[in-house]
Image (spheres, rainbow, N blue to C red):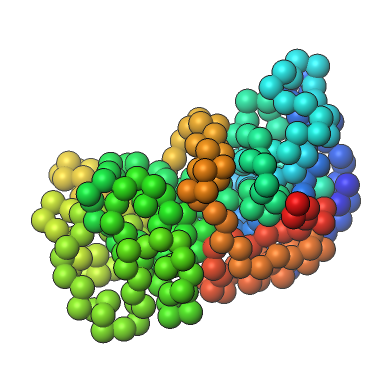
Amino acid sequence: MKAALVTRYGPPDVVTVGDAPKPVPADNEVLIRVHAATVNRTDCGERGAHPFFARAFYGWRRPNRTILGMDVAGVVEAVGANVTALKPGDRVFGMAPSRRNGAQAEYLCVDEDAPLALLPEGLGFEEGVVCEGAFYANAGLTAIGLAPGHRILVYGASGAIGTAAVQLAKYYGAEVTAVVAARHVAMARKLGADQVIDYATSAYRQLRPDYDFVHDAVGKMSPRDWRRLLKPGGVFATTDIGPKGQSLMLWAWSLVTRSGRVRIPVPSRASAPAFVRFMRDRLAGGEFRAVIDRSYPLDAVADAYRYVETGQKQGIVVIDVAGIDRA
């Protein structure tokens, strides 16, 4: 099979498309013919293994796995002898394993109980590769206990995590302010944000401490930025360690003092199967939709990595592995 192969750490050029053995499902596994995958910030971090301590998770000298890609959508081609929940021909979506080869390939084997669900009728495969960003966004929203009546500001509401955070925050009943670059304002409005603000304008600088929560979806806010926006007792949540590691240090201090003021939620992989089922229901009910920036064929996957690393993407970047079926 064709696959995007990563055999050493480095820039996007280390990703090459070549041949790899087609996986064979074990008794408790399903074989998926992949139609769509993504390239995201997590993939870029794993490929480059920065910061260096990340290699403790990914492999010290070289990557432990040679095929990346967490988001997957495709068709079940074969099932193992003990599989009962799925059958050949089922259209599925979800998340690939984090410790085994991923979805940037023509085929993927996963356990029957993996984070996988039936793709809702009427959705194309490219509309189903939305779980990775939403998984991290939802972890932040549930960790802070977002509920109806809360006011939340989502900073960086244009990427995979940010667009998911806006939609899920609205689902949970919150009043949402989305902060984005000027070119993303119209998109954020279409997602249902109650207020959309260009971060480079005076309107952003003049915001008052009116928010119960600030969610930094890109890990770029300084403590001075988010502190001026929070109500007394408000909570800051982020998906990254922040500029110069400041958010990490403040999170540690928050733990020591038990203030709970700073959160860096990391979702448990054990929660992923239930989360994918949750996303299935949101997609089927029209409460969540994919925001697709652009699509690349598998042969151009290195170009997709280069684009994602510009930090300019809107929503998700899709890898069209099998010629996406939009029916």
- In the foreground, 255 or 227: 227
Q: Where, by quadrant of the figure, is residue 191 drawn? A: bottom left
Left or right: where does residue 226 sit relative to residue 60?
A: left
Across and down, in percent, residue 269 comes to 51, 35
Across and down, in percent, residue 187 comes to 48, 69
What's the residue at 78%, 19% (across, down)?
A: 27
Residue 291 vertical placement versus 200 (above, below): above
What's the residue at 77%, 46% (across, down)?
A: 34
What's the residue at 47%, 54% (across, down)?
A: 164
Left or right: where does residue 252 sit relative to residue 40?
A: left
Residue 96 seen in render: no
- In the foreground, 301 or 249: 301
Residue 195 vertical placement versus 324 (above, below): below
Across and down, in percent, residue 28 comes to 73, 21
Residue 133 vertical placement versus 177 (above, below): above
What's the residue at 86%, 52% (across, down)?
A: 2
Q: How many marks?
A: 0
Left or right: where does residue 196 sit relative to residue 6?
A: left
Residue most extreme to the top: 82
Across and down, in percent, residue 240 comes to 40, 57
